[in-house]
Image: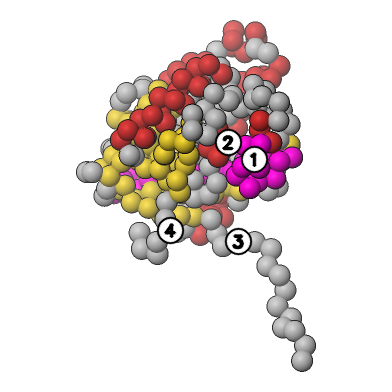
Amino acid sequence: MARAAQPLATAQAPAFFRYRVGDLQATAINDGVYVRPSEGLVPNAPPGGLQQALADRFLPTDKVTISFTTLVVNTGSKLVLLDTGNGDLAAPTSGTWLANFRAAGFDPANVDAVVISHFHGDHINGLRMKDGTARFPRAEIMVPAVEWAFWTDDAKMAQAPAGLKGTFDNTRRVFGPVANDVTRYEWGKEILPGITAVDAHGHTPGHTAFAITSGTGRLLAMSDTTNDPNIFARNPEWSAVFDQDGPEAIKARRRMLDLAVAERMQVSFYHAPFPATGFIAREGNGYALVPVTWRPEV
Ligand SMILES: [Zn+2]
């Protein structure tokens, strides 16, 4: 008798994951991955250190898979999106955000507010497609005031090293057409019901994390306080090549991870493996992300 002719599948189910934060509902929406060589990712790691860290996590040692996960927060009165994914401007292994967002039952036209953590392209390009179309026609766009001041400064742009030019240019591409309507928010303030902006600068000058609270429910949305926590929570003194100010990024990383440990807060990361949420435990001189346990009910 012949074997069944069922072909091997080539894709996972749509990548969204819902969880509660008190009375709020969070939904992690994945935007795919970017695979890059491990070489050059952590300039200040000891020789062979990154390869060992990857092997310790049962990961390939020659390449690193960086995932992208945005967070939708339904506050009950507003549908809020934290960061937007790569839009149609990145590697073909990413850009799955819209399909996953729709699969979760959402429509971009229903987003009330888009809150941006910082201005790297993988966080803002989903606001505006390559052809100039805005993806969230109704949404209030909210950005960190410090981040805005830095990347919109023409004098800073003129003096910027080559590696930063792209972000200055892309800031103008994404926000230029709506510059007068963008809301600039301050750290330490509740910027939307239950969502407080937290200073986590270092990765970029205005890089922001978010404390999301409702009743006894709390979530610390870490943004890029670490890149993949399997590497950088475990080794908090390592600076990813994307960290603009390494020493300040390390301070922010320690501060945020210590807070998560002390308060036993649930956390989310933009670049953790999907669904990019869990808890933080101390491990060695660093920390480990303990993923949440999947449950069928939300
Ligand atoms: Zn990022």
How would you rate the neighbour count of disc 4 (Cα within 10 Å): few for under 14, some for 14-19, many for 20 or more?
A: few
> Callout 2: helix, strand or loop?
helix
Q: Which numbered disc, 4 or 1, marks the residue that appears first in the sequence?
A: 1
Q: Which numbered disc, 4 or 3, marks the residue that appears first in the sequence?
A: 3
Q: Which residue is mark 2?
A: 231
> Callout 3: helix, strand or loop?
loop
How would you rate the neighbour count of disc 1 (Cα within 10 Å): few for under 14, some for 14-19, many for 20 or more?
A: some
Seen at 74% across and 81% down, the residue is 5
Q: Which residue is mark 4?
A: 294
Magenta region: 52-78
Amino acid, disc 3? Gln
Q: Is residue 262 magenta?
A: no
Q: Which numbered disc, 2 or 3, marks the residue that appears first in the sequence?
A: 3
Q: CA distance from mark 1 to mark 2?
A: 7 Å
Q: CA distance from mark 4 to mark 1?
A: 25 Å
Q: Is mark 3 within 8 Å of ligand 1?
A: no
Q: Which residue is mark 3?
A: 12
Q: Give the mark count.
A: 4
Q: Are marks 1 and 2 in contact (CB under 8 Å)?
A: yes
